[in-house]
Structure formats: structure tokens, C-alpha cells
Image (cartoon, rainbow, N blue to C red):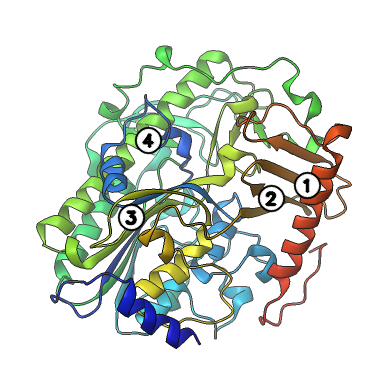
Amino acid sequence: MRSIILIIASLCSLPAFSQQNEKPNVLFIIADDLTTTALSTYENTLSKTPNIDNLAASGTLYTRAYCQYPVCGPSRASMMFGYYPSATQTYGYVSGRENIGPDRKSWSQLFKDNGYYTARVSKIYHMGVPGDIEKGSNGTDDEASWNERFNSQGPEWKAEGEAELVQNNPYGLNPRKGGNVMTTVKADGDDLVHSDGKTAEKASELIRKHKNEPFFMAVGFVRPHVPFVAPKSYFKPYPHEQMVLPPMVQNDWDDIPERGINYVTSLNAQMSEEQEKKAVAAYYASVAYMDAQIGKVLNTLKEEGLEDNTIIIFTSDHGFHLGEHRFWMKVSLHEESVRVPMIIKVPGKKPGICHSFAELLDLYPTVAELAGLEYSDHIQGKSLIETLENPAKKVRDMAFSMHRWRGKFAYLIRTEKWAYIQYDEDASGGMELFDMDHDSKQYNNLAHNPQYAEVVELMQNKLKTKLQEVRENDLGIEYSADN
């Protein structure tokens, strides 16, 4: 059946690629910890990202794309293999191959096995930041996915320059402590001192080298993941004194379950208002630096005359809190943490803005079909090809995400009107319900308001059905809600 669908698609809706290669190239670009709220192409008028903006203007921009797990490792494993984390039981800092097994093909492996040169430049599967970047190591990469792989070593928080720790806990006032904390470095030197600059340079080199053969190039930028490190010139447009913090709502946490309070907050990180502003400014500077590196890669593609034969995808593994509800980092199932930017540019397709729900694991079947490749019937993503033809088309009516924190699960069902978060399958850890039409920043939890009892019941039924659906797989993995 899938072969018939692919043949019909190739005749009716797929683009007519240039004859330079018989097969379309794929350039997959992913940023780390990038929230939509920090991109000018989405909703931020202060943070300037001209290269991402230009890509969005020439491709299809998805306004309702969601990750399946708001932590790097599980999100990337889900995206690359096309299965929900709750189907594969992949929740840690691993590649996903451990549970998927040797016979299931990753997204890039499918292209590799169909005659493509596949290369990974820097972080695609999980890679510890800053640890693996400092060492220049592979992290928990999946070797079977690539013909070649390249790591981009960088100094990270040890970079020469003006460093500052903008949270007082857990490392006191020492700005040179590593790890997953908010250290800012206004670094000396140019772009090539750092990992992302090296990544752009290597990706450009590989594009030039392999321009005469079909390639799947996966380019992973580590910014704006902490530490917030960028050449000091990128900080200049963002003086921290002029940063505007999200509104502080009185008693904001009163209606949020204990497990809904994010693991890093302004309170437990002991952040002053000035530190909060410095963190936001440094995040924007990191995004600007990353955007500039994307511009270099896209410019190389243009210089080599490959734009008419290359599918370009841009996204992030999950979002990031920048002080909303006084939350920071990821892990939360609130909007800023789970919503991701997503852009797909296909030669010959008109640009557009798509408001259909989309999930990161939808990229696998979408690009495979664009390239005319058959993939496993077990893949749990949905092809977005119809939205590339008609951005008004709806492929999904909701998005699903989840996380496991300290051994306990939480789930998100996001529909057109509602965002429903449930802690534990029996809701024993609490619930959150937000009317996204009137409360898009999620300040008023309606889950325990008797007027919304029917809505809660509806969303609980949707969640139950979704969990049953995502566990129906042929992976031979025994599901356990406790593991």
C-alpha cells in the first residue's frame, strides 16, 4: 500500500527536482534548546534571527509544532527513529538504538541504505553540553545512521572572555563552574573559536565536497543550550538593562501542582532581577550567534547551486523557559518548553504558514516521502506532505508530549483550544487545564473548576486513547508505567 501511495505522490504532488542529482539532497538543521519565543519569525520583535527568518519566508512555517519529550536525549531519539518515547521506553540520555534494536532504521539510516551519503556534524542524537563539546566526543550517537560523523570541539564555559554565573545556586558565585547551569561568556575571538562556528565550517566543506552526489547532511548547533557562550559582538544588541521580563503574576504557583513547578526557577536558583535579565540577554545573544552560523551553511548551499535540489528542514529538540512563571530551562510541559520552531523548505513549493498541529516525529515520514523512499509501517509519525501543498490542510488535531521526572510520568494533550497536563496516568499527581484561546500564557488552571469537569473528562479520555495508540507497536518492548 505504501508503495502505491509513494508512486501517486511522486506523480501528483512531489516537486520536480533539478536533474543535477536524480535524488533530492536533504539538509537537516537542528538547534539545541531553542524556544519559539526567541525567534523574530515567530513572535519576538527584539530577538533578531534574519537567516531563520529568510528560510521561513521561502518555506513552510509550522506554528504548532511540538516535541514529544522536552529533554534532549529522548526527544532526539523519538525524532530520529519515528517512535514515541512511551512506545520505545527511551527516556534517558541515549541514542534510542538501545531499545529500538538493530533492525529498525533511523531516519538518516534509511537514506544511507538508499544510496545517500549521510553525515552528522556535531549534535544530532544526544551529546552532553558542555561535556562532550569540550572533549569533542560522539556522545551517545548512533553510528549506524551515518557514513561519516564529525564533532565540533569548543571551549564552552572555559572560553576566554567575560564570564558570569547568572544563578546563585548550586555553585555560589563562581562563574567558571561547568555543567547544566546558566553561565554567560562574552567571549574573545571570532565565530570559529566555538563549536557552532566549527560546525558551520565543516558542514559547508562537506556540501562542497559531496555536491555531485545525493546527500543527507545533518547539522546540529548546540546554542542556545547553556552555557550561553558567544563572541562578545553578539551581546552588544542585547544590553541586559533593556530586557523586559515576563509578567510576574501574584500567587502564580497557587494553582499549579507541585510537580508542575519546573526544576529550575528564579527562586531555587536564587536569581536576582538583574540576573534574570542577564540570562535573557545572553540567551538572545546565543541565538543570534547560532542564526549567523545557519546563514553560512545556507549561503554555501546557494553558492554551490544546490538550492533547487535540496530539501531544507530546521527545528529544535524542544523549547526553553525564559522566566515565564519564573521558570527556566526545559523539562516542563508548559507551552514555552514543548513548542518548537519548525520550517520545511522544498524546491518548487510555494512558501506558507501552516497552523496544523505537527510533531517532531512527523519529519521522518515527511522527508522520506519527499525523496520517494519507502519506510516501515510501524513508524508513528504522520506525513506532512499535504500541508506543503496546502498550508491550510490539517494533519493532526492535537499534539502529544510527555516526560518522566524522578521516576514519575507526566503527559500533555494540546488541542486547538485546550492544553491539558496530567501527572501520573491516574492523575494522582495533579492536573492542569488551560484555555489557550483566552489564556495562551497559561496563568489560570481550570482543571479543578467544576464548570470545566466535562472538558477534563474529555481530555482524560483523549489521553487514555493516545497512550493506548502509541504503545501499539511491534518492537517487542514490554511496557511498564513504572519503568
**Which is more N-terminal, label 3 or label 2?**
3
> Can you tell which mark lies on residue 152?
3
Q: Amino acid at mark 4?
A: Ser
The residue carrying mark 4 is 286
Residue 246 higher or lower than 50, as above or below: above
Residue 428 higher or lower than 210, as above or below: above
> Viewed as shown, does residue 50 lie left or right of 133?
left
Q: Tell me residue 87's x, y (percent).
A: 68, 69
> Viewed as shown, does residue 226 lie left or right of 117?
right
> Viewed as shown, does residue 226 lie left or right of 263?
left
Could you tell me which secondary element the residue under label 1 belongs to? strand
The residue carrying mark 2 is 413
Check whether the beta carbons of the residues at disc 1 and disc 2 lie within 8 A of each other.
Answer: yes
Local packing at callout 2 (Cα closer than 10 Å; few below 14, some 14-19, many 20+) is many
Q: Amino acid at mark 3?
A: Ser
**Which is more N-terminal, label 1 or label 4?**
4
